[in-house]
Image (cartoon, rainbow, N blue to C red):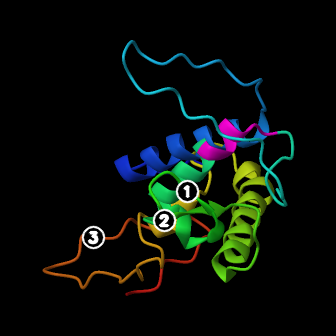
Amino acid sequence: MKLPALSLPTAAAALFAAAVLAVSTVAQAPQSAQAPAGGPPPQVHPAPTNLQVLPKNLTGQQVHEIMEQWEGSLGAHCNTCHTPDPKNIGPNGRPRLNFADDTKEEKATARKMYLMTEDINRNYVAKIDSSGAPVTCGTCHRGHLGPEPFVIPKEDGPRPPQAAPVAGEKPAPPR
């Protein structure tokens, strides 16, 4: 079966998905980051705790990179899923986020959606020859926390002629 060529947004989603998949399936040893001369020190991301759907052997840096990708795909921020900890005040005077806390419903939803995309990719997309891009958060959300509903565009003008049916196949129903 030959599938149509990927559109630019679909190709971009494929690249994003490949990056997420690579980061989430292959844990690397932490890389020592050096601050540029005169620049701020590199941010240290502590080892993650309470990982329930992501691989437990990911480093803090790897989890941070995945979370940044999810933020972009969803148009969200860390505090969408993570709660502030009033007992842990940062240098800016605001509470730091408690990343291990599970009280926000959005965090549970994010976990379910991650498992859903993994299931779709493993059990459906991977079983189609030349299927192209795996499904990611951005496939549906496209930068919006609540995915925008897809509306089929109204037809303007005459329709292009339909291809003749292949012998033995039923013609496509009219729209």
**Which residue carries the number 2 mark?**
74
Type of the residue with mark 1: Trp
- Residue 117 is tagged as none
| Along the line of sight, the residue nearer the viewer: 155 or 74 | 74
Residue 155, position as x, y percentages in the image: 22, 82
Write down the region rendered in magenta. Answer: 58-64
Of callouts 3 and 2, which one flags the residue occurring earlier in the amino acid sequence? 2
| Along the line of sight, the residue nearer the viewer: 141 or 89 | 89
Where, by quadrant of the figure, is residue 65 drawn?
top right
Is residue 131 visible in the rendered image? The answer is no
5 lies above or below 80: above
Residue 36, position as x, y percentages in the image: 42, 16
- Residue 70 is tagged as 1
Is residue 108 found inside the magenta-colored segment of the image?
Answer: no
Secondary structure, magenta segment, majority class: helix
145 lies above or below 28: below
Type of the residue with mark 2: Leu
Crowd rating for badge 1 (residues with CA inside 10 Å; few <14, some 14–19, many 20+): many
Residue 106, position as x, y percentages in the image: 63, 77
Q: What residue do we see at 70% from left, 63% from top?
A: 114
Disc 3 vs disc 2: Cβ atoms closer than 8 Å?
no
Image check: 22 left or right of 7? right
| Along the line of sight, the residue nearer the viewer: 27 or 84 | 84
Q: Outermost residue, top direction?
A: 37
Disc 2 element? helix
Q: What residue do we see at 59% from left, 52% from top?
A: 67
**Which residue carries the number 3 mark?**
161
96 lies above or below 44: below
Q: What residue do we see at 16% from left, 79% from top?
A: 158
Cα separation, mark 2 vs mark 1, equals: 6 Å
Of callouts 1 and 3, which one flags the residue occurring earlier in the amino acid sequence? 1
Disc 3 element? loop
